[in-house]
Amino acid sequence: MEIKALDAKLSATPQITVADLPAIKEKGFRAIICNRPDGEGPDQPTFQEIETAASKLGIEMVYQPIVAGKVRDEDADKFETLMMELPGPVLAYCRTGTRSATLWSLAQADKLSVADILGQTQAAGYDMAGVVRRIANGGKTPTDVGDASYDVVIVGGGAAGIAVAASLRSRKPELDIAIIDPAEIHYYQPGWTMVGGGVFDPEDTVRTMGSLIPEGVHWLKSAVAAFEPKDDAVILDGCRVVKYERLIVCPGLKLDWNKVEGLVDTLGKNGVTSNYRYDLAPYTWELVRGMKEGRAIFTQPPMPIKCAGAPQKAMYLSGDAWFRNGALKDIDIHFNNAGGVLFGVKDYVPALEEYVKKYGVTLNFFHNLVAVDGPAKKAWFDVAKPDTPVERVEMEFDMMHVCPPQTAPDFIRVSPLADEAGWVDVDQATLRHKTYDNIWSLGDVMNAPNAKTAAAARIQAPIVAENVIADMRGSAPLAQYNGYGSCPLTVERGKIVLAEFGYGGTLLPSFPKFIIDGTKPSRMAWLLKEKILPPVYWSAMLKGREWMAKPEKVSAG
C-alpha cells in the first residue's frame, strides 16, 4: 500500500485490502472512497468486504465506481461533494489511484491553477496529461475549443521571443507566426543594474509590448496553461487550444521571491531592495545615496539564475558610489553567495578581486539567504560548506540587496517538455527539444549549460530561426550554439570587466584585445554597456537585425 497525499484532506492509493485497514486507521484516515468497480480484477476484494471491516474500525466508506478512462464531469462534481461531506482526512483508491487523482484534479480545477494541480499530482506519481484540457476548462469537458493554428507558435514575448520572431520573419516573411504572452509591457532588464546604480532612469528600460511585436506576427495576449506536444497543441488559460506546426518555447524564468521567508513583506522598505524588479531598482539607488554608515549585504542564491554577475554588479556600483562620496570607510559590505566562487569563469576573477579589495568587501561563500525580518533588520543564511553540517547564521543589516531564488515557470516545470530539474530539455548545440522534433527553446527557460543572459538570447535567436527554417526545408539543423553569454561586470562607474564566454568557460571575446580586453576593467566596455547596447537591443536584436549575431553554419552532412 503506497499512500500519496494530493492535498491536506485527500490522499490516493492503489487497491487496498482488508489487511491494510488497521494501518489506514493508524495513519488517521476517517473516511475512504472506493473508485474501482467491483469485479474489475480477479484478485480484487469487493467493496462490501472492505466496507464491513472498515465500519468495525470506525472508518466511513463510500462507493463511487468509475470505469477506467471514463471519468465524466458529473463524477467529478459528485467527488467534490463527497470531499465536502466526508470527515477528513480521506483516502481514495482504485486499481492504481489514477482515477481518484483524476477526480480530485477535475474537482479542484476551479480553485487551483493548472500548474498547481499538475505539480501536486505529478509529485504523487500521477500523470494528468490526458485531462489537461478539462482542467484548464474548469474541470468540464470542452464543447467548443475554438482552435487557432499557426506555422510557428512562440511562447514568451521577452527578449528571446521577440528576437526569434523577428529573425524568422527576416528569413521567411510569409510565415504565419503567433507570440503568446499576457504582458502589456516589455522590459530591457539588463538596464536595471544601471538604474540601481543611478545611471539610467527606469523609464529608459520599458516599452509597450504592442510596439515591439514584429509586423505581421499575431499577438495572443493570454497565459499558457499547459502543453500537449503529442497533439502539437498549446492550451491557454480558459482552455483555448492553439495548434502549431513548430513550437518555440522561451517564457523566461520565475523569480521565486516567496522561497525566502519574510522577503515579500519587506521588499521596497526597511532597507531591502533588488535590481531584479523594475519597481525596486530605483529604491536601490535611493538607499545607496542615503547610506552613510552601517552594514550592506548583497546576496546571491544557488544557480541557475539569470545574469549571474548581477548581484555583484549591484555591490560594485554601490561600493563605487560610497567610495566617491567618502562614506565607504564607515560601511561594512558583505557579499553572501550560496556558491563557492566569486565568478564561474576564473579568467575574470583577478580583476574582480581587486575591486573586492578596493571596497573592503567580506566574501561569505556557501551563504544562502533563507529568511529576513525587515523591521528588525535581520537576515538568516544557511551556511552549507562542503563536508560540513548546514549551519544557520543570523546577520544584521542596514541595507540588503537581494537576488531571489529562480526556477522554471510553473507551467513549464510540470509539462512534458521539462527535464527532471524543470527546465526545457534541449540539445545544447541545436537548441532543439530532445524528445519532440518540432519544438525548440531558447533564453532563460532551457537547460543548456550556458549563462542565462540577454546576450545569450541575442545569439540564440538567429540560431533557432536558422534551424527552424532548415527543418521546414527538410534539412538537418544548420546552425550550432557554442554557449556564448556575456556579463558586463560594472566594477565602477565608468569601467566594466566584460566577461564573454561559452560552454566550459571558453573565452569568446567579441573584440580584439587592443579594443577591449575583457579580463581587465575597461572604459570602452562601459561605453558599450551605457551607450551602444540599449539601442542594439531595441533597434537591432528585436527587429531581426543580427548585428554580431550571425549564426555559424555547419555542414548538413
Image (cartoon, rainbow, N blue to C red):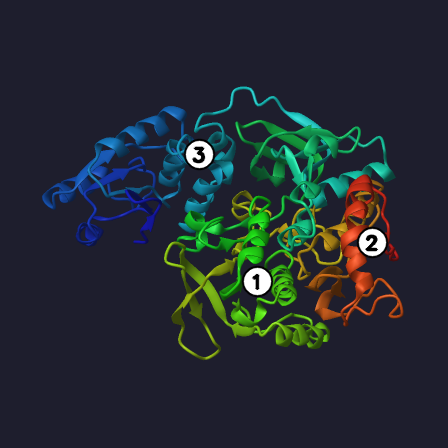
Residue 439 in the figure: left or right of residue 56: right
Answer whether labels 3 and 2 touch (C-beta < 8 Å).
Answer: no
Q: Which mark is residue 479?
A: 2
The answer for how far apart the CA atoms under marks 3 and 1 are is 41 Å
Question: For the residue carrying disc 1, how many other residues have a C-alpha within 10 Å: few (<14), some (14-19), or many (20+)?
Answer: few
State the SS at label 1. loop
Q: Amino acid at mark 3?
A: Gly
Residue 122 in the figure: left or right of residue 163: left
Residue at image location 37% in from the left, 58% down from the top: 376
Pointer 1: what residue?
Answer: 303
Residue 403 in the figure: left or right of residue 70: right
Residue at image location 59% in from the left, 60% down from the top: 304
Towards the viewer: 469 or 46: 469
Q: Against 545, is 291 above or below?
A: below
The answer for how far apart the CA atoms under marks 3 and 2 are is 44 Å
Question: Outermost residue, left direction?
Answer: 56
Question: For the residue carrying disc 3, how many other residues have a C-alpha within 10 Å: few (<14), some (14-19), or many (20+)?
Answer: few
